[in-house]
Image (tube, rainbow, N blue to C red):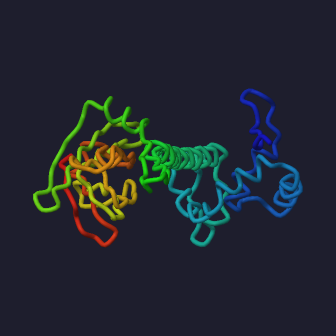
Amino acid sequence: MSGPMSPQSGSSVPSEHETVGAYALGILDDAEATAFEAHLAGCEWCAQQLDELAGMEPMLAALADLPGSGSTPAIGESLSARPSPRIVEKLVDEVAEKRAQKRRRSFYMIAAAAALIIAGPLAAVAVNSGSGGGGQVTASSAQTTFEAMPDKTSATDPSSQISATIGMAQKDWGTQAVLQLKNAKGPLKCSLVLVAKNGQRVTMSSWSVPNWGYGIPNGKTPESKKPLYIGGAAAFKPNEIDHFEVVTFEGKKLVQVPA
């Protein structure tokens, strides 16, 4: 079902539509307000506009000082003064622009959230118990994405001996990242954490390391010798990121990778 239609530009606009701003500001007399309320009961467009304009009454006190608003009302009459249609129109346009800005911010937040959802299949872990009880990480899409990323940084922790490489790609909504993890011995539950230059920490993804591990050079099975590829996303741009951390659920840092 489509949303409420706004009056078409250049068409003959009913006077009731023009009244929505004045009604929101509380400057209609009783007869005008009653007539508009009757119209409002069946007009979705005006109902939507009224919702967006709600809370503007306090602005009336400043209208008398605006150019073109006419003579200055006496003290105590500000809230009953009728601003010119041009001023009402200006207020309506201002609210509409602020509403549009809010929608644009919401769009970028939704895009970043969608990226996290997309990252899931890139890092899908499918455990296939066979005769040997082994499992296999099927992350070919994440690996392909990782290999195509030109911007990569690596580090090996001297204590845990875990090696990690982060591939990054800048997006309109922030940063897409893919982690390649080696020499990770399980069992572990881990997270990839982004640490921004402003100190904020964002968990980009999380996973479990089974007993056989990932990227083990002398692993007993082919699966355990393969690195793990995990996808993630965040709203920070690459130049806003200080470093990445692979940490356990208990808070132990396994490896830190510079951005």
Q: Position of residue 126 (x, y in %)?
A: 49, 49
Q: Residue 41 versus residue 124: which sits nearer the camera?
A: 124
Residue lying at the far front of the rendered structure: 131
| Residue at figure coordinates x 65%, y 60% from the top left | 54
The count of marks equals 0
Q: Residue 147 versus residue 36: which sits nearer the camera?
A: 147
Q: Is residue 170 left or right of residue 257?
A: right
| Residue at figure coordinates x 37%, y 59% from the top left | 210
| Residue at figure coordinates x 55%, y 47% from the top left | 103
* Residue 102 makes an appearance in the image: yes
Please identify the quarter of the rendering in which residue 5 is found.
top right
* Residue 67 makes an appearance in the image: no
Q: Position of residue 229 (x, y in %)?
A: 35, 44
Residue lying at the far left of the rendered structure: 158
Q: Residue 154 versus residue 103: which sits nearer the camera?
A: 154
Q: Residue 58 versus residue 227: which sits nearer the camera?
A: 227
Q: Is residue 67 left or right of residue 229?
A: right
Please identify the quarter of the rendering in which residue 119 is found.
top left
Q: Is residue 236 left or right of residue 10?
A: left
| Residue at figure coordinates x 50%, y 56% from the top left | 65
Q: Position of residue 24 (x, y in %)?
A: 70, 58
Q: Quadrant of the N terminus?
A: top right
Q: Position of residue 165 (x, y in %)?
A: 23, 44
Is 65 situated above or below 45? below
